[in-house]
Amino acid sequence: MKFFVDTADVAAIKELNDLGMVDGVTTNPSLILKSGRDITEVTKEICDLVAGPVSAEVVAEDAKDMIREGKTLAKIAPNIAVKVPLTWAGLTACKALSSEGHMVNVTLCFSPAQALLAAKAGATFISPFIGRLDDINLDGLELIEDIRTIYDNYDFKTEILAASIRSVNHITDCAKIGADVITAPPAVIKGMVKHVLTDRGLEQFNADWAKTGQKIG
């Protein structure tokens, strides 16, 4: 499974990237706002830092302007994946941009039918938002399962990029289902290392070692 980091915080990306935990990055207008930086400047810095795809989102609502914005974003770096919404205009832009060789991430997916349309339109990635489905008492992980079945049935090459990840359990469950990629905030990815028994065991080892009075090196 590939790990994408869902942030525009360059320092946080660098920390994880140095450990080999970053296969790509996803950004959106809200994350750019939070960074407080110019979209082109921060996106270029992220693209220079990370070898894998960096999703940068269009903000237009009609297809023609989405295509124009997508082409502008794609000029920032070769590893840009243009992010478009799962609307009819977004699918139109996806088809146009992917036909020109650009990576496209179709976002805000909430149904298997939408995911099927995105694959037909040539999406590089489909981003089902599992946390937001959980928020309204629907099963976000079931959506991942359904998309996995459909894509495997017809050998679609579009990668399932599980988004709106809220917990470590979301990540491990997506891995068991067979999502190709997850994108999560840095804190959630770093939280994967934590386990109460690991902490308890380390505490006991350190206490026992202190009693020996020895040093290493």
Image (cartoon, helix red, strand yellow):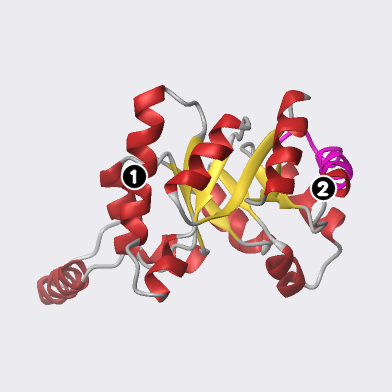
Q: Amino acid at mark 1?
A: Asp
Magenta segment: 67-80
Question: Which residue is rendered at x = 62% and y = 51% of the image?
Answer: 86
Measure the C-alpha gap from mark 2 to mark 1: 28 Å
- How many residues crowd around disc 1 within 10 Å: few (fewer than 14), some, or many (20 or more)? some
Residue at (76% x, 33% y) in the render: 97
Q: Which residue is mark 2?
A: 66
Q: Is residue 128 above or below residue 113?
A: below
Residue 102, x across and y down, in percent: 74, 31
Is residue 73 on the magenta stretch? Answer: yes
Residue 146: numbered disc: 1
Q: Residue at x 46, y 69 (%)?
A: 132
Q: What amino acid type is highlighted by mark number 2?
A: Met
Q: Residue 40 placed where, x, y %?
A: 86, 54
- Quick one: quadrant of the C terminus? bottom left
Residue 42 quadrant: bottom right
x and y percent of residue 59 in the render? 80, 59
- Give left or right: position of 215 versus 105: left
